[in-house]
Amino acid sequence: MSEIINAVFTGQNLAIFGAALAVALSGWGSAKGVGLVGQAADGLLSEDPNKFGKTLVLTALPATQGIYGLITAFMIIIKIGLFGTPVELTVTQGAVLFFACLPIGLVGLGSAIHQGKVAAAGVSLIAKKEGELGKAITNAAMVETYAIFALLVSLLIIILTKVG
Amino acid sequence: MSTAVMQRLTLVAPSSESDRLTRALMWLRCVEVETADPDELGLTRASCDDERNELTRRASMLQSAIATLSEYKTSKKKLFSGRLAVERKRFDADVDKPLKVALETNAASSRIAELRAQKNKKQNDITSLDPWRTHDVPLEFEGTGDTRLTLGILPVSTPLDDIRAGMPEEADGLFEITEISRDERSVYVAVWQHVSCGTRIDRALSAYGFSKVEFRDLRGAPSEAQERLRGEIKEIDRRRSELEAELKEAAEGIAELEIAYDVTKTSLACAEAKQRYLRTESTVYLSAWVPRERIKAVVSELERFECWYDFSDPTEDDQPPVLLNNNAFARPFEGVVAMFSLPRYGSFDPTFIMSIFYFVIFGLMLADVGYGLILTLGCLLLLKLMKPQGGMKQLMQMFMVCGVSCTVAGAAFGSYFGDLIDTVSGNLVGSSFRMPALLNIVENPMAFLYISLGVGLLHLFTGMGIKFYVLCREGKVFSAIFDIGSWYVLFIGIGLIFLVPSVGKWVALAGVAMLVLTQGRAEKNPVMKLLKGVLSLYGIVSYLSDFLSYSRIMALGLASAVIASVVNQVGVMGGFVGIVVALMIGHTLNLAINLLGSYVHTSRLQYIEFFGKFFEDGGRPFAPVAPDMKYTEISDLN
C-alpha cells in the first residue's frame, strides 16, 4: 500500500495533478459560462441574425477563464520539464505547484459561470438597446477581475518557486 | 481641457429661404436645432409632417428596391467596397428617375412573388390529380339528368365489396362504386348513383370514412388537365425569367438608387430640423446651438441669406449639448469616454490625459512587436479599404495608435510573437538566439508587477490631481487641500516610510491628522466632527483596492506572453510546417483574445479607478443637423 502511495504521490505527479485540475475546473466553468451566453445569444439571433458579431464578443468573454487555466497548466508543464528533460521534484515542491493551481482552478470555475450570467443579461441589453454593447461588455468584465487576480497569484507562485 | 463652448444662435429668416438655409447649415454639420417652445413666443410650430411622411415613404421604397436589386446583382461585389464618391450638387437634384426605377423594381418583385405562389398552386394541383389519371371523365362533369357522379377517397382498410354489401337495400341497383386507383393509405373511387337515392348513400358512405374530393377550378379529363397545367407553369416560368432578366439589368444601375436613398435621407434630416422651427405668416424662427469655434463658418454662410441672427451665451437654465474637442492624438479615444458617459457641459474633459494612460496601459497589456505591428498595419489597411465611419472609424484609429505602444513595449520586453525567434532558433537551428530586452517579463515577473503598480499609482495620482484642479477652478481651494491634499500627504508619507523611515512616518501621520481634523468639517457637533474624521480613514481601503487593481496589467501582459510561448512550443514540435500553422492559427487566436481583453480591461481601469476620482457625467451628445449618408461620401468637400 505504501508503495502505491509513494509511487502515486511523487513531486512530479502532484504538479501534474495540479495542472490537470487548473485546466479541468476553469474549463468546466468557461464551458458553462459560454453555454449560458450562447443560449441567450441564439434567442436574440432568432429575431435579428445581424447581431451575430455583437453577441459573439459577449459569448467569448467567459471563455478567458479556461484559457487562464490552460496557461497555468502549461507553465507547470514547462516548469517540470515535460517537454524536454524532466526536472527532479521533491514532494514538497510538487505540493507547492499543486497548491499554486488552486486559485485559478477554483476562481476560474466560479467566475466564469457568474460572468456568463452577466454576459447573458448583456445579450438582452443589446437586444433592446443596440448601442449599449460597450456597457454590457464592461459589466461582464467586472467579474473577470477576480479570475485575473487568481491567475496572477497562480502564476507568481509557479514562477517564483525554485525547482530542480 | 473642457468640453466645447456652445453659443446659442437665434435666427429669423423669410419662409421662402427656410429650405435653402436649412440645407446650407446642414452641410456645415455644426448646428444643433433646438425644439423651440411655441407658447413662449406666441408663435406656431412649423409643421412639415407631409414632407416628412413623403420622404419616409420614398426612403423605404428605395430601400426595398435596393434590397431586391442587390440580390440580382451579377457583377461581383468587392470585398472591401468603399463608399460612392458623389458631388454635393447631386444632393440638390431631384430623384424622380431612380424613384421610377424603384417603383418598377418593387412592382416586378411583388409580381415575381405572385407568380411563384401561382406556380406552387398549379404544382399542387398536378400532384393531387395523379391518382385520377385513369378516370377519363371531365372533372366538371357531375352526372346526367338522372344520375350523379361523386369522386372521393376511402380508407384502404375496408374492401369495396364490404361497402357495397353494407349499402341500404332500397338503393340496390341504383348505385355503382368503382375504384380508380389506390396507394398505401387510400382508395380513390368514383361513385355513380341515381338521383332518387337522395342523401342516403352519402350518409352510408361517410360511415365508412368516405370523403368527397372536388376540383373546383379544373376542367377536362384529369390527364388533360395535368397537361394544361404543365403548359401554364411553363408560361409562368417564362414570364418570371423575363422579369428576372429585367431586374438583373436594373441591378447594374443600383448605384443610382443608393445615391437617391442618401439624397432622400438627407432631405429627411433637413425636414426633421425644420420641424423644430417656429413660424409666422412669412418668417421662420429657430434657436440652435453652435460650437464657438465654428461661429465664423456659420456667419459666413448666413451672410449669403437675407436673415436676422444673433449669438448669445448659454444662460443658467440652459442645458447645452456636449461636444468633445481634442487634438488629433486624443480624438480616437473620445469613443472610450462616450461609452462611459459624456462629461457634463462645461466640466473637465479628460479625453487627452486619459488617452495617454490608455496608450501606455494598452501597450503593457499587449506588449509584443509582432502583435503591435499587425494591429497598426491591419487597422491602417482596413481604414484605407473599408473607409468606415463614426464609432467604427474611431475604434480602428484607436487600435492603430495603440499598436504603436504595443510595439514599443514589445521591443522593451524582447517579445516578437512571444519567444518565437528564441524557440525556433533553439529547436530548428540548434543554437537559440535571444532578442535583446530591457526586461524579460516571464523570467522576472516581479519587476513587471512593480511597473504595473507604478503606472497605476501615477494614474490614480493624476485622477486625484484633476479633482484638485476642478475644485480649485470652482473656487473651493480648501476642499481641494483637505479632501485631496490630505490623501496626497498620506500616500507620499507611506511611500517615504520605505525610503526614509524616520521622515516618512511623520509625513504619513501628518496626512492622517489632516484627514481626521478636516473630514468632519460639515458636521456641527464636535463629537460627530471627530467621528467623521476618524471614519474617513476607512477610505484608504478603497484607494488600496484601486491601486492593487492595476496588477491586472501584469497578469494580462504575462498571459499574452505565456500563451504566445505555448503556441511556439507546440508549433516547433511540428517542424517547419508546424511553425507556420502555429503562427497562423495560434497567434491569430492569441491576438484576438488579448486584443479584447486589453481593450476591455484598459477601459475598465479608466472608468472605475480613474474617472471615479473626478468625472462629472450626464452630458447630452451634440447632434447637429447633418447629411444622412449610408452609401455615399462627398467628393468635393470644401
Image (spheres, rainbow, N blue to C red):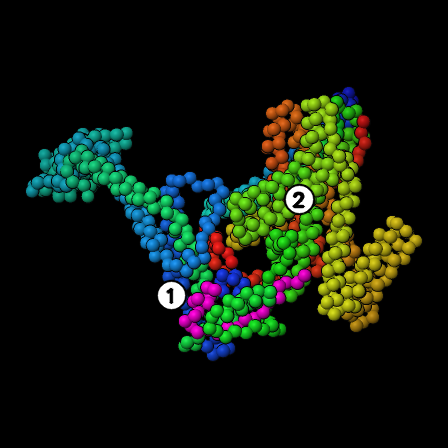
Taking the image as shown, residue B2 lies to the left or right of residue A14, namely left
Report x, y in % for residue B73. 38, 42
Q: Secondary structure at mark 1?
A: helix
- The verdict on a common chain for dots 1 and 2 is yes
Q: Chain of mark 2?
A: B
**Number of the label disc, if any, that sits on residue B50:** 1
Tell which of B455 and B402 is nearer to you.
B402
Q: Chain of mark 1?
A: B
Taking the image as shown, residue B567 lies to the left or right of residue B34, namely right
The residue type indicated by label 1 comes to: Asp
User: Looking at the image, can residue B139 be seen?
Assistant: yes
**Number of the label disc, if any, that sits on residue B404:** 2
Question: In the picture shown, does residue A86 fall above or below B466?
Answer: above
- Dot placed on the residue nearer the N-terminal end, 1 or 2: 1
Tell which of B481 and B265 is nearer to you.
B265
Report x, y in % for residue B222. 18, 35
Taking the image as shown, residue B463 lies to the left or right of residue A140, namely right
Q: Residue at x 63, y 54 (%)?
A: B328
Q: Which residues are magenta?
A: B1-24
Report x, y in % for residue B352. 67, 56
Residue B18 included in the magenta stretch of the image: yes
Q: Residue at x 77, y 58 (%)?
A: B539
Residue B370 figure quarter = top right
The residue type indicated by label 2 comes to: Val
Residue B170 figure quarter = top left
Q: Residue at x 68, y 31 (%)?
A: B420
Q: Secondary structure at mark 2?
A: helix
Tell which of B627 and B490 is nearer to you.
B627
